[in-house]
Image (tube, rainbow, N blue to C red):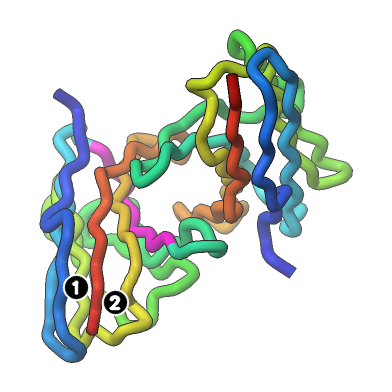
Amino acid sequence: RKEVEQDPGPFNVPEGATVAFNCTYSNSASQSFFWYRQDCRKEPKLLMSVYSSGNEDGRFTAQLNRASQYISLLIRDSKLSDSATYLCVVTPNTGGFKTIFGAGTRLFVKA
Amino acid sequence: EAQVTQNPRYLITVTGKKLTVTCSQNMNHEYMSWYRQDPGLGLRQIYYSMNVEVTDKGDVPEGYKVSRKEKRNFPLILESPSPNQTSLYFCASSSTLYEQYFGPGTRLTVT
């Protein structure tokens, strides 16, 4: 089983739709969680951190459920510019800088 | 401008010919990492460094070496490249265990 697993995708949605991505992680001692965005052939960039209390930034909402070892990202009112690959990222509690990326979920937003 | 630079951006080489991919950051970050990205596998951490002269293995260190003699530089060395090291490589830096800033990537082909 992979340490971090994401919905395989791709997700094809119309503009204005709400789309949700899910991610599960296997190490219950993991301490930090993030969503990164990666445009085609570009470097990943931090979208938002994920906290147990939830985190909202405009149209984006991230949630963490430690009991179920589950992270989610909700995008409301999708824009064409949201088309990208979304990467779930987990930092295990190993005392170092080890970082585990999910394989990513591709999103296509169409007019 | 705050940035992470990598060189070269593209490299085609032959099996067994030693190569170095350079990475430099101008943000005075303590943490630096190298990742490789392959289709369907996402980003996998090769090595990371938590400060000068402090490095540790990530998930896929075999066939790679790193050094951190200066805070700003974190070169990736392939002593004897093989075709299975054909990949897209990213360097990243961070001032904390949170947001990582990625370089533009190096596309390596080993024939």
Does residue A29 appear in this view? no
Residue placed farthest to the top in the image?
A: A58
Q: Which residues are magenta?
A: B29-37
Disc 2 marks which amino acid? Tyr
> With respect to residue B80, does A97 lie above or below?
above
> With respect to residue A57, does B35 lie above or below?
below
Q: CA separation, marks 2 and 1?
A: 6 Å
| Image spot of residue A44 (x, y percent) | 41, 40
Residue sitting at 60 percent across and 25 percent down? A110
Disc 1 marks which amino acid? Ile
Query: Which one is nearer the viewer's eye here, A27 or B15?
Result: B15
Helix, strand or loop status at disc 1: strand
Give the crowd class for mark 2: few <14, some 14-19, many >=20 residues within 10 Å.
some
Q: Which mark is residue B77?
A: 1
Mark 2 = which residue?
Answer: B64
| Image spot of residue B90 (x, y percent) | 31, 53
Image mark 1: chain: B
Query: Which one is nearer the viewer's eye here, A27 or B92?
Result: B92
Quick one: label 2 or label 1, which is nearer the N terminus?
2
Quarter of the image where the N terminus of chain A is located:
bottom right
Q: Quadrant of residue B75?
A: bottom left
Residue sitting at 33 percent across and 58 percent down? B34
A74 left or right of A79 in image? right
